[in-house]
Image (tube, helix red, strand yellow):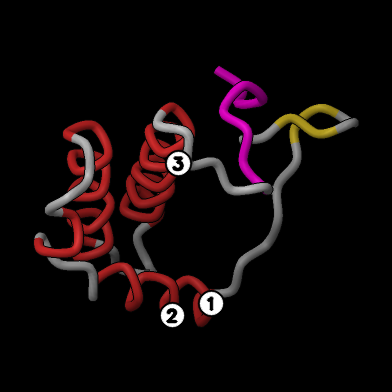
Amino acid sequence: MMAGPNEQTSMNVSIAEMSQGVSAIRSITLDDLAEASPAIKDEGERLVASAEAFQPVNNFEGTALLTAFVGLAVECQKAGHRPSWFDAERLRR
């Protein structure tokens, strides 16, 4: 979770939106990750595996998918590739 001005924030995501995002992640191949650093490649592979296991009716699989996404975003930030909407320093532990 990212900490906002009122502490924890969240947003609702529909199953259709989640399914569309998961489909995009499933299209990532090992070739797409071939030139990534070992840490980013590992997190990318974890994200793809979580997407492949995702079933919209199972909250555990959704949690694994989101955890893998955050792990990848953290490793990308460490490597200097930080999207404007993500700051690992603001993650709550």
Residue under label 1: 17
Q: Is residue 64 left or right of residue 18?
A: left
Label 2 amino acid? Answer: Gln
Secondary element at tag 2: helix
Q: Is residue 89 magenta?
A: yes
Pointer 2 with pointer 1, Cβ within 8 A: yes
Which mark, by number, is residue 20?
2
Q: Position of residue 46 (x, y in %)?
A: 21, 46
Q: CA distance from mark 3 to mark 1?
A: 19 Å
Q: Residue shown at 17%/50% (left/top)?
A: 35
Q: Is residue 57 magenta?
A: no
Height in image: 22 above or below 63? below
How many numbered marks appear?
3
For the residue pair 60 and 16, the one nearer the viewer reads as 16
Q: CA distance from mark 2 to mark 1?
A: 5 Å
In the rendered image, the quadrant that contains the C terminus is top right
Q: Which residues are magenta?
A: 85-93
Q: Is residue 34 left or right of residue 3?
A: left
Crowding near the residue tagged with mark 2, few <14, some 14–19, many ≥20 C-alpha atoms within 10 Å: few
Label 1 amino acid? Answer: Glu
Q: Residue shown at 50%/75% (left/top)?
A: 15
Q: Residue shown at 51%/82% (left/top)?
A: 16
Secondary element at tag 3: helix
Label 3 amino acid? Answer: Ala
**Looking at the magenta stretch, what is its main secondary structure?**
loop
In the rendered image, the quadrant that contains the N terminus is top right
Residue under label 3: 73
Height in image: 86 above or below 21? above
Height in image: 51 above or below 89? below
Q: Nearer the viewer, mark 3 or mark 2?
A: 3
Sequence order check, earlier mark of 3 and 2: 2
